[in-house]
Image (spheres, rainbow, N blue to C red):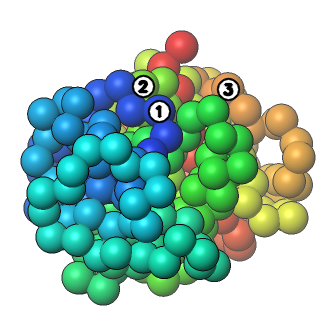
Amino acid sequence: MKKALIIAAGTVESVDCSGADCIIAADGGYDAAERLGIKCDLFVGDMDSVKTKVGCETVLLNAEKDFTDTECAIEEAVLRGYKRIDIYGATGTRLDHTLANIFMMKKYLERGIDIRIIDEHNKMRAIKGENVFHGIAGKTVSFIPADSVVSGVTLEGVKYPLFERDIEIGTTLTVSNIAISDPVTVRIKKGTLIMILTKD
């Protein structure tokens, strides 16, 4: 499956471009790409936070708009046929942007788009249904409800397993588990979880 990589204007310390078929800068993310020596294929933004002269294909947005530059960059990637998208710079000091970006993963999952948000300490994605994860043994993993209630959650291959539990939003029951086997299996009967792999 083709993968797009978006660099947004949050905190960006490093970017793994391996496997990316298209690199998109969301406004100020272009500066981070330049600093890291990454060549972007596309710029999407209103130019309000980028300081570097843009030297690639550009989708110029109005300064007054109903969506963030990051969401517009996601939409542009979707329009170009990408169903897997990694985003760097989606977290940082702007908690409003961070939360909006995290919950956007749920919205796009409903459209069949698999988004991962990656920073120096975390890898996040929205999941529903049945999921099997390889190569995460030994890692700290949390599951945060993205709906008022996520029903019938089963966790296998973790230190603290669950069997068909209903998880309410706001609970800490599924925070800071540990993957102990390969694979880890997560089954969800109804609803969406935000899965977070954390580097302590």
Camera-side residue of 27 and 132: 27
Dot 1: few (<14), some (14–19), or many (≥20) neighbours within 10 Å? Answer: some
In whole angstroms, how far apart are the C-alphas of marks 1 and 2? 9 Å
How packed mark 3 is, by other alpha carbons closer than 10 Å (few <14, some 14-19, many 20 or more), is some
Q: CA distance from mark 3 to mark 1?
A: 23 Å
Q: Position of residue 160 (x, y in %)?
A: 68, 29
| Res 171 visible | yes
**Furthest residue toward top:** 200
Q: Position of residue 52 (x, y in %)?
A: 26, 44
Query: Residue under circle 1?
Result: 11
Q: Which residue is mark 3?
A: 176
Identified by mark 2, the residue type is Glu
Pointer 1 and pointer 2: residues touching (CB < 8 Å)?
yes
Instruction: Note whether residue 184 is visible.
Output: no
Q: Amino acid at mark 1?
A: Thr
> Residue at (33%, 61%) from the top-left corner?
85
Residue ID for mark 2: 120
- Which of marks 1 and 3 precedes in the sequence? 1
Please report the residue visible at 55 percent of the width from the left and 40 percent of the height from the top.
91
What residue lies at 30% left-to-right and 56% top-to-bottom? 25
Viewer-proximal residue, 52 or 37? 52
Which dot, 1 or 2, sits closer to the camera? 1
Label 1: element kind? loop
In the displayed structure, would residue 117 be above or below residue 22?
above
Q: Determine the image quadrant of residue 73.
A: bottom left
Label 2 or label 3, whichever comes before in sequence order: 2
Q: Quadrant of residue 75?
A: bottom left
Q: Quadrant of the N terminus?
A: bottom left
